[in-house]
Image: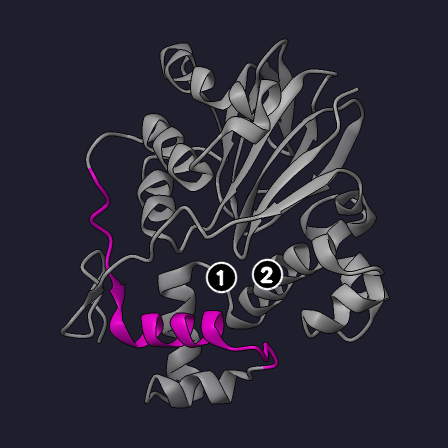
Amino acid sequence: MSVPRWYLWEGGFLLTARAQGRVPTHAHHAIQIVMALDGQVALATPADGWRTSAGFIVRPDAEHAFDCNGALGVLLFVDPESAEGAWLAAGLHADVTAIAETRLHAVLPELRPFVDQPDDVEDVAAVISRCLHGLGPGLAPTRRFDSRISTVIEAIRASTDLRISLEQAAGMACLSPTRFAHLFKEQVSLPFSRYMLWRKLTRAMVAIASAETIAAAAHAADFADAAHLTRTFYQMIGMAPSVLMRGQFIEIESPFSQPPTNASGRASSRPVK
């Protein structure tokens, strides 16, 4: 069995590994892309049951189960608030989408060196970005976040303290807590509290790579304790956080950029009153 190799950044990761075993139903805020370098993988949703393919894309916050079927797989988590993530998500019309063979054939040769010659991949972030664009629906992203929501998201990303309350975030956006909560969910498609839990989890993933214990990683990501982090991992990832302690870790800069804001304070895709 190949040694799992994790390329981690806050908001996502690229994992290469050969794995067997079913991951139970869970849901997370990332766009999940899974591709097999050999064989096929399987994914299931509560509505459609199990399907097999050489590659799938899972929409953000969609409930799904996963089985690598012993394939040598590449798993990519993409932040849906990134420009590339928003672009890719806009072209997804179902919770789980099988990737067309033509797109897989264009992308997989770029990913193969991550398994065969990982130390020779010089610009990891650039390769990941190219691969995602190879899977995308065509034209560059056009989605623009309301500037007030972008201000809050940027502050959350920059903060070392993720114990930011709804009231504090609303103050950053110069909105009432009720109006902010409504606008945030409208723009991000996730309640603010759930989004903050997701941000803590993505920060914990990076922390686990360098922490000696799950408790230390939980503390670094502002979880109450190791038990809270473990419960959140099971709910959102479908497995224990200790899984991340198996393998090799490389922390990189995010391959993706944040979407531009509309200077008027209104989202181009949906009017804000």
Q: Is residue 38 above or below residue 251?
A: above
Amino acid type at mark 1: Leu
Residue at (43, 21) in percent of width and height: 110
- Which portion, as a residue range, is magenta? 140-163
Q: Is residue 200 above or below residue 240?
A: below
Is residue 228 a member of the stretch shown in magenta? no
Residue at (80, 40) in percent of width and height: 246
User: Within 10 Å of the Cα at label 2, are there few (<14), some (14-19), or many (20+) other Cα atoms?
Assistant: many
Q: Is residue 269 above or below residue 102?
A: below
Residue contact between numbered discs 2 and 1, judged by CB atoms under 8 Å: yes
Q: Earlier in the sequence, mark 2 or mark 1?
A: 1
Numbered circle sitting on residue 198? 2
Task: Report the mark closest to the observer, 2 or 1.
Answer: 2
User: Within 10 Å of the Cα at label 1, are there few (<14), some (14-19), or many (20+) other Cα atoms?
Assistant: some
Numbered circle sitting on residue 190? 1
Is residue 160 a member of the stretch shown in magenta? yes
Q: Closest to the observer: 100 or 209?
A: 209
Q: Closest to the observer: 70 or 174?
A: 70
Residue 74 in percent (x, y) is at 58, 27
